Image: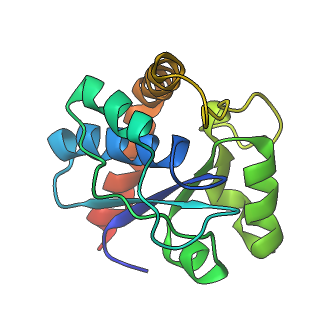
Amino acid sequence: MSSKFVIMFVCTGNTCRSPMAEGALRHLLQMKRPGKFEVVSSGTAAAVGFPATLYAIEAAKVWDVDISGHKSQPLTPALIDRVDLILGMTPGHVRETMHLRRDVRNKTFLFKNFPENSPDGEGVADPIGQSLEEYNRTFLEIGEYLGQFLDEIVKRIDEKTNAN
């Protein structure tokens, strides 16, 4: 594991929800803990190297977040092993992560439930194939939840980076 605190968002194709969440959290944390974290994303059914969708890129601009350089990557056991915190966009993403690595329950959360560790609950709906308005709604929903638990993520970053 790295000396930085590594957070990973998991969705299906790694071109909409998880890249938007990755960009938004990176933007928020850059102001609070520069240099002490890394944010990545992956997909349970992702191919390698696809960009974020055009609407995801546009929706992220709401916060002046640039995800235009994003490249998709599949969720793998090696990727799971290198991260400190995993946030799945739906219960299915959480289950798939825990299927790949059974011993990661303590660091794998349903996005909307964090920091509670129940894998059951409401997911973030996939906007793929929908309007820019729907992508904007999804991005704002992600942002609302990030705002609610940003302090908890900062606390976890501090716990790891101050211990090193």
Image coords of residue 135 (percent x, y): 49, 26
Q: Quadrant of the C terminus?
A: bottom left
Image coords of residue 155 (percent x, y): 38, 45
Quarter of the figure with residue 102: bottom right
Decide which of 16, 145 is in the foreground and name it. 16
Vertical placement of 77 versus 116: above or below? Answer: below
Vertical placement of 96 versus 61: above or below? Answer: below
Left or right: 43 as drawn, with respect to 133: right
Vertical placement of 162 versus 139: above or below? Answer: below
**Number of marks present in the image shown:** 0
Q: Quadrant of the N terminus?
A: bottom left
Residue occupying image coordinates x 28% and y 58%: 69
Residue occupying image coordinates x 58% and y 78%: 81
Left or right: 143 as drawn, with respect to 120: left
Decide which of 48, 145 is in the foreground and name it. 48
Residue occupying image coordinates x 53% and y 22%: 131
Image coords of residue 98 (percent x, y): 78, 64
Left or right: 149 as drawn, with respect to 151: right
Vertical placement of 144 versus 16: above or below? Answer: above
By what rule are the colours in the image chosen? Answer: rainbow
Residue occupying image coordinates x 16% and y 53%: 34
Decide which of 89, 161 is in the foreground and name it. 89
Left or right: 146 as drawn, with respect to 101: left
Image coords of residue 126 (percent x, y): 65, 35
